[in-house]
Image (spheres, helix red, strand yellow):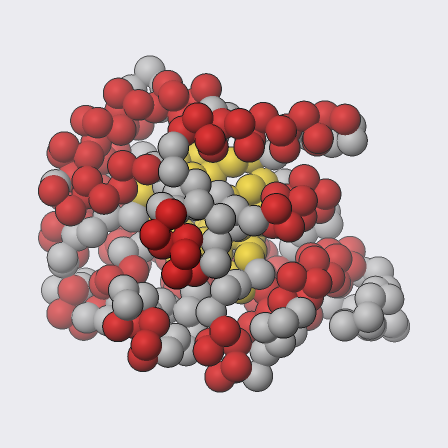
Amino acid sequence: MRFAVLFPMRAVKHYDRWRLGGDLAEVGRIVESAGFDGFAMSEHPFPSNDWLAEGGHHAFDPFVSLAYIGAATRRLQLMTYVMVAGYRNPYLAAKAIASLDVLSGGRAVVGLGAGYLRPEFEALGADFVRRGAIAEEAVEAMRAAWSGRDHDGPFFPARGHRMLPDPVRAGGPPIWIGGNSAPARRRAVASAEGWIPMGVSTEIAAMTGTPPLENVAQLGAQVRVMQEQRERADRPPLHIAFTPFEADLLREGAERYADLVATRLPSYVEAGIDTIVIEPVSRNLDEFRRDVELLGKTLISTPVGR
């Protein structure tokens, strides 16, 4: 089992107060020192006020912020969790990702999703209706750019171009597809190295249009089907990253959350999860340090954790 920290999304709105004079470099060092394997950033460049009023959140630019973290750390994987494929041209995305990968020594992991917020797509001039098809082609276009190949897709054809420097790994960093939908699962099986499902209640699913995912048994069943599909296609197993269903308990304290999740880690392992992602709800940097150190000590030191 591997563990990653997602930067507290609620901290972005009040970042100047939240950081207590520190910065993201200190955040990254705290996470790495606590034994975590990865650091993740969400993406929402221009969310609507209506969505924010319903519980949505702001986010740093993932590539700028992950580069900052990468410069302050030595081994943390740097994860987009997740970037929305349709928000930018895939060749600009490929350039940002390759730059992050090279400058961090090969630590980039690309969590990528199709997105679901129509107002944000519209504000950015992005195509909401065809977002699924665009996300699929974006993966192909980025990999072509990283490999020095031409690309002949309908949305982003490009012949006779070259992007340097190449990413550290041949063919580019691993891509993990985010989302619970059948198309997202199909994309992960067909063209990615990992899958990032999201625990979603029936109520939230009705608001977002994302299929619900409410318990470990349901999650494990989906993972088994996808891994069987990979095996039939003679492809390596998918990595599976997941934020535990117990995440709401973090609001009652990191200690209670850590103790409960530690007892349930075997069920997540049995379900096929190999990366646990935790988003602390710390109200400032001092609390973040305390919470991350506690979470690392409790979870990573378990027999399942290491």
Residue at point 38% right, 21% down?
267
State whether residue 47 appears in this view. yes
Residue at point 39% right, 61% down?
207
State whether residue 38 appears in this view. no
Q: Is residue 300 above or below residue 113?
A: above
Q: What percent of the width, then of the height, locates residue 275? A: 44, 35
Q: Nearer the viewer, residue 171 or 241?
A: 241
Q: Is residue 114 left or right of residue 119?
A: right
Look at the image and tell me in which quarter the N terminus lies: top left
Q: Is residue 46 left or right of residue 240?
A: left
Residue at point 47% right, 32% down?
219
Q: Nearer the viewer, residue 101 or 283?
A: 283
Point out the residue furthest to the top here.
303
Q: Is residue 132 left or right of residue 115?
A: right
Q: Nearer the viewer, residue 168 or 49?
A: 49
Quarter holding residue 65: bottom left
Look at the image and tell me in which quarter the C terminus lies: top left
Residue at point 12% right, 50% down?
287
Q: What percent of the width, then of the height, locates residue 15? A: 21, 69
